[in-house]
Image (cartoon, rainbow, N blue to C red):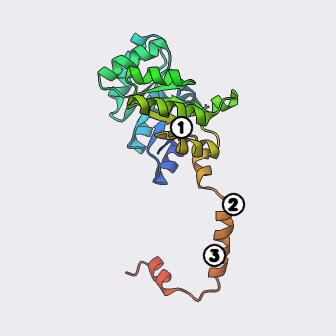
Amino acid sequence: MQLFIDTAKVDEIRTAADWGILDGVTTNPTHIAATGRPFEDVLREIFSIVDGPISVETVSLDAEGIVAEGRAIARFHPNAVVKVPVMIEGLKAVKRLSTENIRTNVTLCFSATQAFLAAKAGATYISPFIHRKELAGDDGMVFVRQIRAIYDRYGYKTKILAASIRTVKEVLDCLLAGADVCTMPFDMLQALYKHSMTDAGLAMFLDDWKKVPPAKLFTEAHAGVH
Ligand code: G3P
């Protein structure tokens, strides 16, 4: 499963990219607004940090407008993916963009039938909103499993990009349910690494290491001796 970061904050993107586990980025109008910076400046910087799919959202409500914005996003950088809300005008635009070989990410998906329609329209990615579904009393894992079953049963190539992730368990659920990608905020990426028993175990190992006589192998390594 690929890991994307869901933010437009370049310092967070740079840090996560430096960890070596980041495959891409998803942004949305809320993330762009939170930076307080010009749209194009933020995009330019994100594209310079991550060499992977980067979703940029359209804001028009009619297919003509979405297609025009989508083409502009696609021209901006070869790694750009056009993010389009799942609605009739949005899916009309996705159909047209897909025939122009422009990659799309259909967002704000809250039902498996919406995911089915996005796949029929030729979407590259579908973004089911897991945590917001859970907040509404639904089971996020069942949701992803339904989409996985539909896509596998009918051979749709659209990738499941699980979004709106707020807990480690939701990431685990996505892994087990067969999501292709999971996008999450920076603090969630950090949380995937953390375990109190790892911290406690490491503290014990390092404490015991103090009892070992100076290790030439390591002192030479730190000194750059080959
Ligand atoms: O960017 C789409 C989505 O991941 C945002 O979800 O619920 O974290 O605001 P949320």
Instruction: State how far apart marks 2 and 1 are (Cα).
Output: 25 Å
User: Is residue 5 visible to us here?
Assistant: no
Q: Residue at x 41, y 30 (%)?
A: 158
Residue closest to the far bottom: 213
Amino acid at circle 3: Leu
Residue 192 image offset from top left, x and y in percent: 59, 51
Residue that appears at 29% across and 22% down: 100
Q: Position of residue 141 (x, y in %)?
A: 59, 37
Q: Nearer the viewer, residue 55 or 87?
A: 87
Spatial distance from mark 2 to mark 3, Cα to Cα?
16 Å
Q: Are marks 2 and 1 in contact (CB under 8 Å)?
A: no
- Mark nearer the N terminus (2 vs 3): 2
Q: Residues within 10 Å of mark 2 (few under 14, many from 20)?
A: few
List x then y, in percent, for residue 142: 59, 34
Quadrant of the rendered image holding ligand 1 = top right
Question: How far apart in space, not on screen, are marks 3 and 1 (Cα)?
Answer: 35 Å
- Mark 1 beta carbon near ligand 1 (under 8 Å): yes
